[in-house]
Image: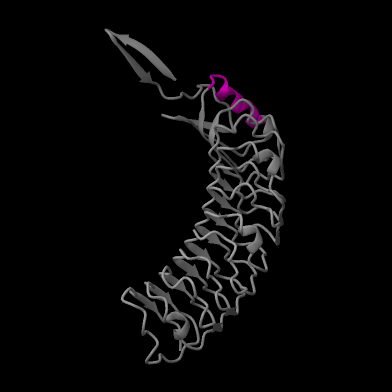
Amino acid sequence: MIIMVWAGLFLIALTVGASCPPNLSPPCQCQEKSKGLDVSCENGHVDQLQTSLATIHSDGQPFLYLKLRNNQLNNFPASLLRGLEVRHFIAINSNISTIDDTAFEGLGERMETLDLAQNSLTRVPSRALEVLVMLVSLNLNYNKIEILHAEAFRGLSSLLRLSLFGNQIKFIDNLAFVGVGGNLTRMNLGGNQLSAVPSRPLKDLQVLQRLQLHENAIAAILAEEFQEMGESLDTLDLSSNLLQELPARAFSNLHLLNSIDLERNKIHFIHIQAFHGIEGSLEWLKIGENELDEIPAAALHGLTRLRQLDLRGNNISRISDEAFVHYGNKLKFVYLQKNR
């Protein structure tokens, strides 16, 4: 709320923080912030939430945060947020299985972050989400999503961060990320059931900087696996998969790749040209807890900017005279514990 006050010849603008209603009913609680209200609601049903939120909204106050935890929403209704102004919305562990197509209507120019983790969604609620043109962060962790269908995130043109960790994703349509590639810089697909790197869907993510594919069932990386992706990727996490080998030119198109995590796989062979194309960018390499019998010196020698090399927990029994030659002067950390 802004109050205009005349003081002599000067017009002074006084900003008054949002105020909570004195008669707020359970299950919601309210705190006053300078940019809007911080509202938390727990252990309630839809009708209770609607009554409580309507009381808060009666004065037309904007919500900086609206946090719904441990509620029983089941089918998220269109009426719950109707008329509200919400910038950051959290609805976690609330048994949400479906979301009405118009649930976020009117919030497209306001909502910036949306957290729907720990619910029971079986698919991305695309029709409900597509109006959120200003959304920069979407968290769908720990739901029951099995497939990312074509244009699953259409309309989310401002999205910077997308997290889908801990679902049951087995298949990603080649067009799944159409419409979000222009700004998306971070994506987490870890903790799913992917059996291969989703290379073709990823080609639309031209500015992606951080990609997490850990804790899946990826058994192989093909030669030049990421060749159709943009060259902006900085961090790649493939830890806790089923990889056995690294082929030649596996990462050759990722010229800015700075960090690769390959820990907790079954890697026993690394091709001499496995890191071809990223010799001038790679600084952090984790290959711990694999099945290497020796330091893969021939493959590593070209990595002149390497700062950290983690080889802990393998089957390495000796270090050859040439093991650490030709690395340049950047290498600072070498981990070899838990070997032989």
For the question of whether residue 335 can be seen, the reply is: yes
Residue sitting nearer the eye, 30 or 206: 206
Q: Is residue 76 left or right of residue 158?
A: right
Q: Residue at x 47, y 82 (%)?
A: 299
Q: Residue at x 64, y 34 (%)?
A: 104
Say if 278 sits above or below 84 in the image: below
**Magenta stretch bounds:** 48-60
For the question of whether residue 296 can be seen, the reply is: no
Residue 46 rendering spot, x and y as whole percentages = 68, 33
Say if 247 sits above or below 46 in the image: below
Residue 123 sits inside the magenta stretch:
no
Say if 253 sits above or below 25 in the image: below
Residue sitting nearer the eye, 291 or 251: 251
Q: Farthest residue toward the top? A: 8
Q: Residue at x 44, y 65 (%)?
A: 258
Q: Is residue 94 left or right of residue 110?
A: right
Residue sitting nearer the eye, 284 or 58: 284
